Image (spheres, rainbow, N blue to C red):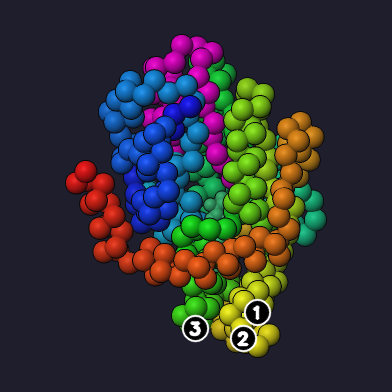
Amino acid sequence: MRFVNLDALTYAGNLENVAGLTDQPNYSFELGDITDSVLVERLFDLYKFDAVVHFAAESHVDRSITDPTTFVRTNVDGTIVLLQAARNNWKAGQGLFHHVSTDEVFGTLGPTGLFTLNSPYAPRSPYAASKASADHLVRSFGATYGLPYLITNTSNNYGPYQFPEKLIPLVLNNARQRIPIPVYGKGDNVRDWLFVEDHCAALEIVLFQGSIGSTYLIGGSQESSNLGLVKALLDVYDEKTGQASGHSQSLISFVQDRAGHDFRYAIDSSETQKELGWSPQHSLIEGLKKTVDWYMKHSSWLSNILDDSYRTYYKSQYDNR
Ligand code: DAU
């Protein structure tokens, strides 16, 4: 099996993240943008793909609030480019298009209840709306052109290599630098946390065993309020860095809430678990411990990825090959 990784290496991308793969004979990296239809058609022609796993997205809600257009460009226009290439290059019923999506397409929950396969689409941020649009486009290609597809809607990921704009790596980065840790509002919003390796295991099972035309919900079943999460994370961090318990909590700083901040996400993945035999292997605390270990071991990665000149250097290494 051959793998081709197409990535635009924008601000959160970093070739160092896939450095361990470069020497693998069945792996190729292609630098490019999914909105570039000429490039995408060329790659379909070159590699004769039999499946596309579409992870490529602008994914940070705060950025979508300040710059929604970029989200529509990548997440909607980019998805239609990939879908059109699949339609042009695969005969009806051939190939497999897997869209990796988010639970945010379902909007926000109150204090109880779970997102299920029957939850209506109700996105509330430009990011979520762009992912919902992409889900709808994928399903429309299934119904209209017979494109075989799978969709996965997933809860909050965390773990190694996550860009420090998302809550967990941001907390670790700020704790390391001893700078304030911003908690939006009162910190009582709730997220369902999924360790990234559990997500990847689910994606692999869905890709190879999922029923064509189906949607699978993938969640960690590990809910926490943001404040509870930040405190738990800082406790792990303090313990692992040999500091007194509670030491880093003084860095917590309550700041203005995110506009339209979804109150709670929580996903019912029991159907996926029943049909495919997948279940998350990490409790939140186990996942946080692994994550803290990884970031402590890779502290230079954390500072490097925030350094534009470093990323430009890595990108130019590829350009100059
Ligand atoms: O639910 C899945 C989604 O989870 C993914 O589709 C998104 O791509 C991903 O970014 C994530 O969205 P969130 O907005 O939930 O993740 P984020 O890490 O930005 O924020 C998690 C929670 O923490 C959220 O309630 C906002 C809050 N927060 C976030 C940041 C960055 C803070 O309180 N302070 C912060 O500095």
**Residue 234 left/right relative to 94:** right
Kindly identify which residue carries mark 1: 239
Kindly identify which residue carries mark 2: 243
Asked where in the image residue 184 lies, by quadrant, the reply is bottom right
Kindly identify which residue carries mark 3: 178
Please report the bounds of the magenta region as a residue range.
76-102
Asked where in the image residue 185 lies, by quadrant, the reply is bottom right
Where does the image place residue 106, in percent across and percent down from the top left? Answer: 65, 45
**Residue 175 left/right relative to 313:** right
Estimate how packed mark 1 is, as few (under 14), some (14 to 19) or many (20 or more) residues with alpha carbons within 10 Å. Answer: some
Q: Which amino acid does label 3 sit on?
A: Arg
Q: What element carries label 2?
A: loop
Q: Magenta segment: does it hold 222?
A: no
Q: Nearer the viewer, residue 128 or 316?
A: 316
Q: Which residue is drawn at 55% across and 39% down?
A: 100
Estimate how packed mark 2 is, as few (under 14), some (14 to 19) or many (20 or more) residues with alpha carbons within 10 Å. Answer: few
CB contact under 8 Å: marks 3 and 2: no
Where does the image place residue 199, in percent across and percent down from the top left? Answer: 62, 46
Q: Which residue is drawn at 60% across and 35% down?
A: 204
CB contact under 8 Å: marks 1 and 2: yes
Q: What residue type is labelled 1?
A: Glu
In the picture shown, does residue 202 fall above or below 63?
above
Task: Report, in whole angstroms, how far the alpha carbon at label 3 lies from the one at label 2.
Answer: 13 Å
Q: Which amino acid does label 2 sit on?
A: Gln
Q: In which quarter of the image is the C terminus?
A: top left
Where does the image place residue 77, in percent across and percent down from the top left? Answer: 39, 36
